[in-house]
Amino acid sequence: MLQDWIESFKKNKQAGAALAKAAPKLMAAYQGFNASQNGNGALDPKTRELIALAVAVTTRCDACIAAHANAAKNAGVTEAEIADALGTAMALNTGAAYVYSVRAFEAYQQFSAQ
């Protein structure tokens, strides 16, 4: 096991509670923003959680992975659906690495031409 995600989820909630006590307006705004997502209801909960997990991977947010893996389970997401969503995240990261590799190569070429 790489990480105890259930324990991580619990600890993140505890840490969040401490921040909420120290900065209640900030946390109320954050929670309000979270609650307002998907306000028009166009996406079902499974789709939202698949997107959230893919984004959590691309942003490298362990707390997000824990929270949205749990929410995905609660929304009825299957392992096959998770695997497809994570494959999309992997492909996107690979694509981003390609684009930035092209940029880095171009920068090198411009400096070499001086």
Image (cartoon, helix red, strand yellow):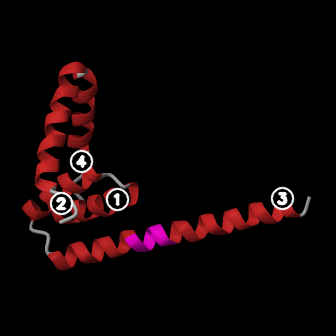
> Does the CB distance between marks 2 and 3 fall below 8 Å?
no
* SS state under label 1: helix
Q: How many other residues sit within 10 Å of disc 4, few (<14), some (14-19) or many (≥20)?
A: few
Name the residue at 24% across, 42% down.
Answer: 34
* SS state under label 2: helix
| Residue that label 1 marks | 55
Q: Quadrant of residue 85?
A: bottom left
- Residue 32 position, x and y percent, is 23, 34
Name the residue at 13% across, 35% down.
Answer: 14
| Among the two numbered marks 4 and 1 on one chain, the one whose residue lies closer to the N terminus | 4
Q: Quadrant of residue 91?
A: bottom left
| Location of the N terminus (image quadrant) | bottom left
**Residue range corresponding to the magenta coloring:** 90-94
* SS state under label 4: loop
* Of the two numbered discs 4 and 1 in the rendering, the one whose residue sits closer to the viewer: 1
Name the residue at 45% across, 69% down.
Answer: 92
Instruction: Give the CA separation, mark 2 to mark 4.
Output: 22 Å
Q: Amino acid at mark 2?
A: Ala
